[in-house]
Image (spheres, grey):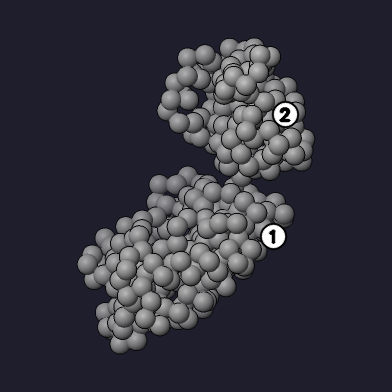
């Protein structure tokens, strides 16, 4: 039971876990509510409408709170009311990064809060074997969608049609959802890193950035391929080759013990030495798991150190405003040697 891992973080006293991804990580419960952990006892506080789902959760006591007055013998009227009654303490641990501002204000008016967000994200950043298997499957689903998208991209389709086909394919291949809305960015739109697909039809000479990921059994995947449609310019080809070189050099250095900032530096050096440093406008990568962006962070100012069984992306890019952009991204498992890259498609020009 993963819930036992909380005892290392909350040795004594009470903790309240609010983040839905954190609750899912510790219990497998996927609904509204809060996970309380007091002196070794885990209690899932769920609203009435989630009662059935909550009762299926193993390894926790379940207590229901009633946001509406459906009966006279209501014990808890809200999450905060329940936490107050169950803990009866002045001071609690909480994953403060997961709180919205109004919950934070209400909670901090009642309790002294001690933040355990970073301990939980550090724990979640290193995956166990069960998680790695699920992420690999999420990658296989993404891979099917990526290959179909690359095949169909040259058949007179627009960005929205292609992103819809990707979503449909991921779901028919077993995903419950996408990890994030699928990005298909063609031509000048590809210079926008987080472009929202439009009616623009893909045409000859385009750069087409396809950034997609499945969500399978609660776990995300993240992959980007850039397709250059025939008759593309030499300038675009050159940029593609620089991004690919940056990505491959950075991937080659990914290993247990290396600083995440060093991976960012390696990718950035390749792009800078070719004169495109100011067009690489985002960090090199991030951890992937229950959240599509989670610890560790592969950026110049990251203090994270890569460790075995972390799952990360490496995704350098170059974006020339109004003209085109290129990004190439893989998700990989960190090992003590070379990373295990969970490829989705060949990197073809
Ligand atoms: Mn990514």
Asked which quadrant contains residue 31, the reply is top right
Q: Position of residue 237 (x, y in %)?
A: 33, 80
Q: Residue at x 53, y 16 (%)?
A: 112
In which quadrant of the rendered image does the N terminus lie?
top right
Q: Residue at x 57, y 24 (%)?
A: 67
Asked which quadrant contains residue 4, the reply is top right
Q: Circle 2 sits in a helix, a strand or a loop, which is it?
A: strand
In which quadrant of the rendered image does the C terminus lie?
bottom left
Asked which quadrant contains residue 140, the reply is bottom right
Mark 1 vs mark 2, foreground winner is 2
Task: Please say if 284 is above or below 233.
Answer: above
Q: Residue at x 61, y 45 (%)?
A: 124
Residue at image mark 1: 133
Q: Position of residue 179 (x, y in %)?
A: 52, 55
In this image, 2 relative to 231: left or right?
right
Q: Is residue 164 visible?
A: yes
Q: Position of residue 142 (x, y in %)?
A: 56, 67
Front position in the image: 313 or 171: 171
Per the model, the C-alpha gap separating discs 1 and 2 is 29 Å
Residue at image mark 2: 62
């Amino acid at each position: 039971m993963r819930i036992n891992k909380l005892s290392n973080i909350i040795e004594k006293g009470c903790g309240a876990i609010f983040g839905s991804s954190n609750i899912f990580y510790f219990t497998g419960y996927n609904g509204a509510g809060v996970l309380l952990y007091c002196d070794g006892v885990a209690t899932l506080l769920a609203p009435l409408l989630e009662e059935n789902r909550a009762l299926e959760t193993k390894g926790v006591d379940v207590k229901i709170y009633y946001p509406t007055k459906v009966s006279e013998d209501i014990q808890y009227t809200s999450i905060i009311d329940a936490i107050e009654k169950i803990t009866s303490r002045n001071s609690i641990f909480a994953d403060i990064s997961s709180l919205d501002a109004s919950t934070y204000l209400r909670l901090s008016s009642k309790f002294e809060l001690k933040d355990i967000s970073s301990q939980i994200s550090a724990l979640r950043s290193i995956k166990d074997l069960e998680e790695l298997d699920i992420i690999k499957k999420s990658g296989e689903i993404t891979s099917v969608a990526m290959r179909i998208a690359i095949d169909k991209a040259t058949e007179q389709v627009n960005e929205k049609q292609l992103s819809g086909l990707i979503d449909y394919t991921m779901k028919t291949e077993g995903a419950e959802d996408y990890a994030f809305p699928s990005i298909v960015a063609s031509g000048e739109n590809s210079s926008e890193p987080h472009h929202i697909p439009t009616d623009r039809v893909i045409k000859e000479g385009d750069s087409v950035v396809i950034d997609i990921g499945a969500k399978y059994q609660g776990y995300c995947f993240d992959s980007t391929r850039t397709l250059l449609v025939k008759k593309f310019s030499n300038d675009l080809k050159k940029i593609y080759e620089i991004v690919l070189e940056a990505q491959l050099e950075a991937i080659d250095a990914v290993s247990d013990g290396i600083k995440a900032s060093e991976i960012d530096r390696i990718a950035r050096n390749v792009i800078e030495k070719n004169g495109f440093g100011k067009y690489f406008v985002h960090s090199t990568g991030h951890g992937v798991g229950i959240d599509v962006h989670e610890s560790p962070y592969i950026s110049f100012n990251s203090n994270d150190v890569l460790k075995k069984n972390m799952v990360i992306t490496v995704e350098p890019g170059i974006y020339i405003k109004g003209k085109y952009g290129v990004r190439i991204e893989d998700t990989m498992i960190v090992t003590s040697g070379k990373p295990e890259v969970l490829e989705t498609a060949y990197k073809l020009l």
